[in-house]
Image (cartoon, rainbow, N blue to C red):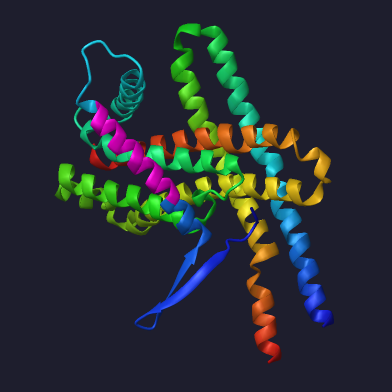
Amino acid sequence: METLGLIISVAHIAAAICLLNGLLTTFGQAKIASQAIESMARQPEAADNIRTSMFIGLAMAETSGIYGLLIAIIMLFANPLINTFVNLLT
Amino acid sequence: MGIGVKTFWTFNIFGVEVWITETIVNTWIIMLGLIALAIFARIKLRSFKEIPEGIQNFIEAAVDIFDGLAKSNLGEKLSYISPLFFSVFAFILSSALFSVFGLRAPTADFTTTFALAMLSFLMMLIMGFKHKKGKYLKSFFEPYPIFFPLNLIGELSKPISLSFRLFGNMLSGTIILTLYYALTPIFVQIGIPALLHAVFDVIFGALQTYIFVVVSLMFVKNAAD
């Protein structure tokens, strides 16, 4: 039982660490948005094209953050290690 | 609404277990709505006039805007596949708007998004073989044949990243709203969730729909051009 508690607590800590990649994702997205706004202010006639590219770039940069979120969700709700441990006991 | 997907009933067909889940039922409801809308538009099509008014205005604007988007991303030559992606667009957008009513969006389940991403992937392969023929196979061995495993991984990661992006965004909205409904007392559940629904379902849903379609179109163009 103690081992199971250890596995669950380590899984929660791992999920928290996974979500730390939000720091870098946000940094990258902030850079994209600030550059896009700067170039929009410089060339207002190209604003539509820049906005389209900005949204695509934001989505691409967001992907790594989403991967971290998914790993955290798997750790919390569908952890494969707990099943392995329960199978080992029986 | 909940974090997990509920299973309504299960039955056996020749020893294979078939699960009818919340996602499938919600997909049927959306399909019913979209098919009814399509039949309605088809009947209205007979009485279309030269100068549009009312519902004709709306339909023409929707088709026109999407055709412009497809043409700007695919080019004139390949834009004949835009109706397929218009239907994908309509499905994802309506399923994102579906969760405004407190029901679970079908795209918050990985099976739905993976099926949609596989559709884009198959479309990519078909268009590549149709327009480039042997050259498409050869493009896996460029610049040198030793790069084949890298190119293969690069191609296979496209549907996975496409499906995970949509799934993660929709699931995060569902989880945040489920937590809000579960943890707060009843008197703050009247006005404030509307704001959360507007951000997580309408804005993120529309943005992710746009991005899914545009990125699929870009993949198809890269394969076929």
Q: Which residue lies furthest to the bottom in this view?
A: A90
Q: Residue A10: x percent and y percent? A: 78, 67
Residue A72 placement, left or right of B153: right
Total labels: the figure holds 0
Q: What predominant SS class does the magenta segment belong to?
A: helix
Q: Which of B17 and B143 is in front in this view?
A: B17
Q: In this view, does B195 lie above or below B172?
A: above
Q: Nearer the viewer, residue B144 or A42?
A: A42
Q: Quadrant of the N terminus of chain A?
A: bottom right
Examine the rendering and report whether any part of residue B129 can be seen.
Answer: yes
Examine the rendering and report whether any part of residue B75 can be seen.
Answer: no
State the image quarter where residue B76 is shown: top left
Q: Nearer the viewer, residue A56 or B205?
A: B205
Residue A78 among magenta residues: no
Q: Residue B144: x percent and y percent? A: 29, 51
Residue B12 placement, left or right of B1: left
State the image quarter where residue A63 is shown: top right
Residue at point 65% right, 28% down?
A30
Residue at point 69% right, 54% down?
A18
Q: Residue B195: x percent and y percent? A: 69, 31
Q: In this view, does B166 lie above or below B149?
A: above
Residue B43 among magenta residues: yes
Give the residues in magenta.
Answer: B29-44
Q: Residue B163: x percent and y percent? A: 46, 50
Q: Quadrant of the C terminus of chain A?
A: bottom right
Q: Which of B65 and A29 is in front in this view?
A: B65
State the image quarter where residue B58 is shown: top left
